[in-house]
Image (cartoon, grey):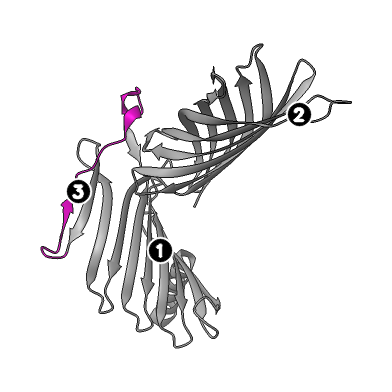
Amino acid sequence: MNRATLSCALVLVCLLAIASRASAQEKPDSTYGSGGSKAESTVTHDDGTVEKTTTWRDKDGTVREQFTEVKTKDGDVTETHDWFNQFGMKIAEDVGKYDKSDHCTYWREEDYLDDGVLDAGDIWEDDANGRRVHKRYNRETEKYDAVGYIRFDFLRVVPGFKKPVLLERTFFIGAAIVFEDSGQRFATYGVEGSYTHPLNREIGIMADAQWTRGMQDEVTWTKLQFLAGLVFCEQAHDRLSLAPHILAGLARVTPDYGEPAGTGTATNAFALAAGVDLGVRLNRRSDLLIRADYNPTFSGGTQNNVRLTAGARFLF
């Protein structure tokens, strides 16, 4: 084999190696108007890190949005989401970091002026002692300064659950059972759903709805419950997480006496739900969740109900 043939063979091998480590595809996309495009690429680095990038362009070929996911061989993930104006200048950026158990451990969100200069930003991260730190961008000093705030890591005292987890938007749906405290105890069974929206990465608001039904002394009771309140910082141990919440709202109970009496008059009562969620993270976007609540209602006295719900929670 002469040198020329050997050189060509080496070049071919190198090209094949590069092709195996990098791939890209582009297709039409109308996210930023007709004539735009969306390109996806994947690069595998020598250290095992996999970098996936999605880029959206308008009809003029200007980059308007870009999302990059970098995953190390240890399972840690960094997601960077950038937005650009029609001139290609950055107007916003979000950066999130997730550990190998898929819990969010770092978050940065920034807004830029039209000329690409940083205007505002917030960072949530852990200090050397594992405590949550909130920093805010100071335009005068052009630095991030620590912001004082009330900590809500109540469950940090639970052995093993020392690691704080940043709150994300979630939707939960599950099968519910309520142990009703009404004379002779009985249970109602049904479904519960809730939505959580972070006010910041430490505390959020939750809206919750429940429908359950059960029988006591040949009377069928249907219970509707609509609650809203606060959910606090999660604490994690590997793929497990704990998060407390406190909710308040309305419970509406309707009796059905059967034939011939039929449906009776519904009763409305003030209700509370104070409890904790135990989650088992499945992946970045979902986990299994068990919710336990002290769920009293107040109508002619206090009914000390207990609610248990098990289901799936979706993060987005």
Q: Residue furthest left?
A: 141
Label 2 belongs to which residue? 264
Q: Amino acid at mark 2?
A: Gly
Mark 2 vs mark 3, CA separation in Å: 55 Å
Position of residue 60 measured from the top left corner of the image (x, y, whole percent): 44, 88
Label 3 belongs to which residue? 147
Q: Nearer the viewer, residue 253 or 15?
A: 253
* 172 displayed left or right of 124: right
Q: Residue furthest bottom?
A: 60
Q: Amino acid at mark 3?
A: Val
Q: Residue furthest top?
A: 184
Q: Is 307 located above or below residue 124 in the figure?
A: above
Q: Earlier in the sequence, mark 3 or mark 1?
A: 1
Quarter holding the N terminus? Answer: bottom left
Q: Which residue is located at x 35 percent, y 84 percent?
A: 87
* 35 displayed left or right of 63: right
What is the crowding at mark 2: few (fewer than 14 residues within 10 Å), some, or many (at least 20)?
Answer: some
Label 1 belongs to which residue? 68
- Across the whole image, how many numbered discs are drawn on residues? 3
Residue 232 visible: yes
